Image (cartoon, helix red, strand yellow):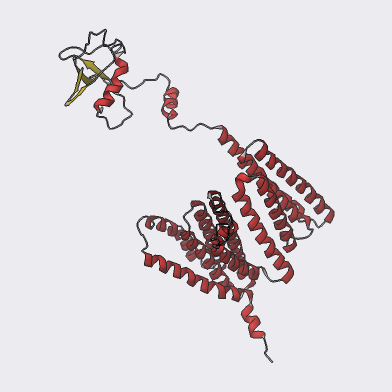
Amino acid sequence: MSVHADDVQVDLALPAGVAVASLLPSIADLLGVRDGHNDDRVAARYQLSRPGEAALDTSKTLAQHGIRDGSLLLFSKASTEIPLPSFHDPAEAVSISLAASARPPTKRTARLSSCLAAGWLSGIGALTVIRTVFPTNDGDQHGAVAGVVAAAGCIALVAAVIAERGFRDRLAGLTLGLQATGLMALAGLVAVPGSPGAPNALLASTAAAVTAVLVLHGVSSAATVFRTLACFAGFAALAALAVLVTGQPLSAIGGICVVISLALLEMSARLSVLLTGLSPKLSGDQGPKPCQGNAIRADSWLSSMTAAFAASAMLGGIGVALTAWRAGGSGVVGIVFATLTGALLLARARSHNDMARVLMLTAAGTVLVSASFAAVATACSDHVLWVVAAAVMLPAAPFGLQLLAPVVRLSPVGQRNARLLEYLGWAILVPLACWICGWYGAARAWRLP
C-alpha cells in the first residue's frame, strides 16, 4: 500500500493483523515526520485515513478497516493536540516535574558518604589525641596512648586486607587502608614524649611508610594511592633524619628538600620506565618483552612519584616561606624561593597529559603560591589597602588563564621558550637554596692557609 504525508510518498508493506496505534510510530519514523515543535519532548498525535474520509480507528487493525493491498492512505497529524496532564494536588505536580531530573541516592552513594564521614571523624580524633597528649610530658601516658593507637591501626590494616580480598570491596579497602596508615603515623607521633619535634616526625613518617607498603601488598586495587603515601612518607622520614642529625634549621632543610623533590620530579618519568622494565634492552639481552601490564604499572608509578614529590616540594616551600620571616634577615629570599617553587610546579603541569597528575601539580603549586602570599600579607600588615587589593585581585589570575587557554595555542617556538623559562627558574632556584641554607656565609668564613 502507498502512504502519503505532505510531499512524501512511501510504499509500505504493513501487517493486516496489528492495531493501527502500534503502526503509527514506525510509519512516522519511516516517513521522517517532525511534529513542528521546538521542544522534542512535546507529544504529537498522528492518524491514518483514506482520501476524503475520517481517520481510522487506532484500536482496530487494517483488516478490520477493510484496507487491502494497493490501498492509498494519508498520514497526518491530528488537529487536536494532546493536553498536558493536570493534577489536583500541587505536591504531586511538583513531584512529577522533578522526577526526570532527580538523582535518587544509591547504595554506592551511601557507602561513599559513610567512608567520607569515617575519614573526617578519624581526622577529628587524631587532632583530639594530639591536643590531649602533647601538653603532658608523662612518658608512660605517651607510651600507653601510642600502644592503643597502634593496636587500632593494626586492626584497620587487617580489616582493609579482608575487605579487599575477602569481600572484593575496593572502597572499604581503600578507606581502611588510609585509616591504618594514619593511625600508625599518629602512634609514631605521640610515642616520643615532650614537645613535637624532629624525633616525632621521624618516627611518624617511618611508621606511615612501613604501613603504606604493607597495605600496598594487601590492597592492590589502590596501589597508586598507597605507593604515593609510601614515597612521600619515606622522603619525609629522610628529611626528619637530616634535621635530627645535622641540627640545621627548618628553612635550610626545606630548601634542600625542594631542590631534591623538583629534581626527582624531573626524573620521575625515567624512573617509572626503569622500575617497570620498559627501558630499552641490549641486543644480546633475552629478557621478557614489555607488555601492556608494564605500561600500566609504569603509568601508576609515574602518578605516584609525581604526587609524592610535588607534595614534598610544596611542604618544603611552605616551611621556607613561614620560617624565613620569623628568622629575619632572609625573609624576601624565602618568599621569592617559595613563589618560584610554586611557579615551577605549575609549569611542570604543562608537561603532563594525564588529568590526575595535572591536578596534583596544579594544586601543589597553587597552595605554595598562596602560602607565599599569606606570608607577604602577614609581613606587610601595615599596608592594609595594598594587601586587600592584592587579595581581591589574586583570583583573577586563574580565571584569566582559563579564558585564554582555549584561545591561545603556543607554537613550537613558544613551547621551547616556555621550557627555557623553566630552566631559567631552575638556574635561579639553586642559588637561592644555597643562600637560604647559609652556604655563602660559610664560604666567606673559610680561611685558606
Residue projecting furthest to the bottom: 449
Q: At x 30% / y 22%, what residue is drawn?
A: 25
In this picture, residue 16 sits left or right of residue 159: left
- Look at the picture and state if 266 lies above or below 90: below
For the C terminus, give its image quadrant.
Answer: bottom right
Query: Which of these two is toward me, 11 or 150?
Result: 11
**In the rendered image, which quarter is residue 240 located in?**
bottom right
Q: Is residue 371 visible?
A: no
**In the rendered image, which quarter is residue 257 located in?**
bottom right
Residue projecting furthest to the left: 52
In this picture, residue 391 sits left or right of residue 301: left
**In the rendered image, which quarter is residue 288 located in?**
bottom right
Query: Which of these two is toward me, 357 or 380?
Result: 357
Q: At x 37% / y 20%, what residue is drawn?
A: 86
Query: Which of these two is toward me, 275 or 57?
Result: 275
Q: At x 43% / y 67%, what residue is drawn?
A: 418
Q: Where residue 365 appears, x then y in whole percent? A: 52, 60
- Look at the picture and state if 33 lies above or below 357: above
Looking at the rendered structure, the number of numbered marks drawn on it comes to 0
Q: Where residue 244 appears, x then y in whole percent? A: 73, 67
In this picture, residue 17 sits left or right of residue 201: left
For the N terminus, give its image quadrant.
Answer: top left
Residue projecting furthest to the right: 140
Q: At x 47% / y 60%, what residue is drawn?
A: 351
Q: Where residue 274 appears, x then y in whole percent? A: 58, 60
Q: Is residue 346 visible?
A: yes
- Look at the picture and state if 17 lies above or below 254: above
Q: Where residue 328 appears, x then y in whole percent? A: 62, 73
